[in-house]
Image (cartoon, rainbow, N blue to C red):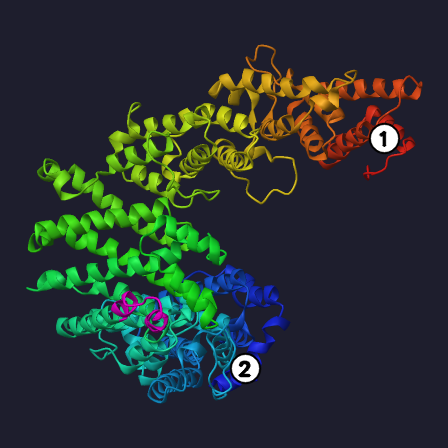
Amino acid sequence: MDCSTVSSVGDLSFLLLRADHVDWKELLSRSFGVEQADKEMRDALMDKDFEFAKEFMVSGAMGLKTPATRQAVFCQLSKLISRIRVHSRQLLKLLQNNAEAITQLKDYKEFLHWLSKLAFELISDPDWHKKLMESLAIDENKKIEGKNGAEVSSKHYLTNGNKDENIEEYEVDDEEGIEENDEENSIPFATRISALTLISLIFKPSIDSIGSDSFSTFLDLRHWIGKVEQQKLLFALDDQFEACQKIALNLLNHFVSIGWFQTHSQISDEEWLFLRVRPNMPRHQQAIKFRLQFHLPRMELKLQLEFIETLLKMSEESSNIVTNASEGKEHYFVEALLDSPQLHSLLNALHVSLPYVNFKMLDKGSLFISRILSLCLLVDKIVSPVVHSLSPEGFMPSLDDASICVKGLFKYNLIEILIIIATDYNICAQQLTRTCFRAHKSISGILAHIFSQYLTSSFSSSLLKNDVNQYLSQIASYFWQQLTECRHRGAFEAASNEFSTVVCPRLWTICAENCQLNNYKTLFPYSPKQWLEQILAALTGKDDSHKLCVTRRSAGLPHLIASLLENAPVKMLNDEQGLFHQTIRQLMDCSERQNPELEVHCINVLRLLFMHSKFSELVLPHVECAFRVTIEGSSSEFWPVRNAHTQLFAALIKRVFGTPAVERRTLHIESRCKQTANEFFKRYPALFEFFLSQISFISNGLEENSKTSWHQFGCKHLFLAFPLLITLTHLRPHVLCLDDLQYSLKPFLPNLLVLLLYVPTHSVRALASAAILSNSTDSELQRILAWLILQTKIFVNGTSNATQNFVAAIQLLLLHMDELKISSCESVSKLSEWISQQKLLLNYDVT
């Protein structure tokens, strides 16, 4: 097919199917690689270069599904376009009386225009967008007919994907609608993202240098963007994928900023359709989000306020209906939360709109802020009992457990209404929980924005002092509750993100302002330091801790403490007796309190602090103590405690030894993640004796002649062995093997050998084998092999019989030596020959 004939989506559909049948390495090298490598940026492009490039683009390059391949393609294409720009600027200086320069410039312009047309053809399918809007309009009409005729009840919308017999064929549930719309869009995601990326490569450099770049003026790119291209970019805001939406929004904003694109200054019917119909579909919420981000900044303040007023009225009506829900009137709850427009959809639109509306310019701006705050706090009372009863994954617990849980924690017990609805109306309760969670997520963003922009700024003087204090106290209580009690991961992560990036920095800023320091307690109920003291008091058992979240990762609690410390002044962090180091010490003492639940919380907080990039240097003085705590805790009799210590130990290993370049799938540690014993134990000297005593404790019950060895070796020994052995696999002897080295790994080798030969657990034997090979020098390894040969001779002479574990341990050691390519010797040959003579139940292949 000739490249010039490619002008429609239909023509390109065949080419896109070829993407999987092309040798992309060869074609990329031929088009942009070897033949272009020796050419400088100012060298001209020849006709064959354009032919190669066009052949490459229409051979399926726009439909590549692998991100890495797409990145390689567009990296080279970016270099090609840059080369065109550089050489064109050179030609424009020689334009007079130079026919060759004029011809070359025209070729460049035609090639870029061809790329632009190709890309705009593939941004979005107009037919798909038309069908999308028609389906939304059908749903809107269906909703109106259902209300007027009382024929389509809310029961249909809440069934678990089952259609009512009275519903026409075109009415589908949410999930089916997503799949059908995706199928109708004939242009796949990979093609759409490639097309938008290509448009950015062509237009972005010209936009950034508008008026100052002679080549951009020569191209006259403004006339390349007609009504059809503008419409397609707007359609891309409704794309199913956020990556496409972001690029389209960025392009539209740039085109508007330089006057290439004119927008209407009000919310259109299409935006209201997205708000009113099927808001359970996440991509509809994303579509209205990006549409509002594009339209609101360009609207007049009056129209912005009218839109906010409409959102508030609709949200307040829905909330008031819910508050009237009671026994016998459960349908109010259904109508408010699940009938369109749904409450969470309105709150999401309000959350997106607030940053673009400046209430400080209004005389009655305080009334808007008060209404928004009151609405959020009311909706929080409605949805929190539901959200807080969910599992971390967002699933409903058993109905009886949920009711008991909420009765114990909340006065406002709407979970009972949820149970009644789910039973009587044949509803999928998960749909209700999803609706409540999305509303809850928007509340966190709205409260954080109002807190930072209005309640803690000069704008607060326009509000009554008592109202300000009350709102501040309620917002503080809201974030405290979400980060200490909520189990739902999405809910506490949303609250944590807003708290750490918006609320907490503002709290510390207020503390630092001397003018407000004296009246701080009246301005806000807690300072960040007081928040930290209060949560540490609960963790150390000095305060009531029964409301703390009981999940195995402590939910938002670690994020709360990390946010408070992360935004603290530098002096409080670096001071030896400062806030950070005092917090670490208090958390380290968790094992002394003999409370497993509090110990789990403390260890989870320590894990996050050791993983946090900002604290990478600050935690180093506490590594030694942390190793002792986590190794001792790994042998706890309580599984949640062991699990938490395992996570902390993994964080310590990464902090001390670093992260491997590639995912490790063997027990052998790469050299970049190892340290010499002298280097490690000089930094943490107390760990040498501690490690030696702990590994001796494990091996003491495993002496060969001990008749009670298996009774002495229990779970405590087993769990204690793992962190010790893993740490030892990260250590190696010094290269020079000097005798005057302060710390040597020789004392560990006898105990490691005992663990290798006599522990009945294969995973421990494997770690012991890897530790032996990592900790021993060549001469020490030879002595170990020689000793093993002596032991085999005892078995050969009939003095005793070799156990299966003993034979398997030697075979495992030889296998690891082969994996590490350790040179063979006579000892290895003898041991291999002896193993081949044994009747081993589970054999390893030793080469």
Whether residue 305 appears in magenta in the rendering, the answer is no
Q: Where is residue 839 in the image (x, y as percent from the top left)?
A: 90, 34
Helix, strand or loop at label 2? It is helix
Q: Quadrant of the C terminus?
A: top right
Q: Position of residue 351 (x, y in %)?
A: 27, 63
Q: In this view, does 796 lie above or below 282?
A: above
Question: For the residue marked with disc 2, what is the amino acid?
Answer: Ser
Task: Please state the extent of the stretch shown in magenta in the rendering.
Answer: 318-337
Question: Looking at the image, is mark 2 or mark 1 earlier in the sequence?
Answer: 2
Quarter of the rendering containing residue 439: bottom left
Gap between marks 2 and 1 measured at Cα: 62 Å
Helix, strand or loop at label 1? It is helix
Q: Is residue 324 visible?
A: yes
Name which residue lies at 34% across and 69% down.
333
Whether residue 327 appears in magenta in the rendering, the answer is yes
Instruction: Please identify the residue farthest to the front as the structure is shown.
Output: 328
Residue position for label 2: 13
Residue position for label 1: 832
Q: Is residue 530 above or below residue 211?
A: above
The tag on residue 452 is none
Judge the density around disc 1: few (<14), some (14-19), many (≥20) Cα neighbours within 10 Å: some
Judge the density around disc 2: few (<14), some (14-19), many (≥20) Cα neighbours within 10 Å: some
Q: Where is residue 322 in the image (x, y as percent from the top left)?
A: 30, 67
Q: In this view, does 634 lie above or below 44?
A: above
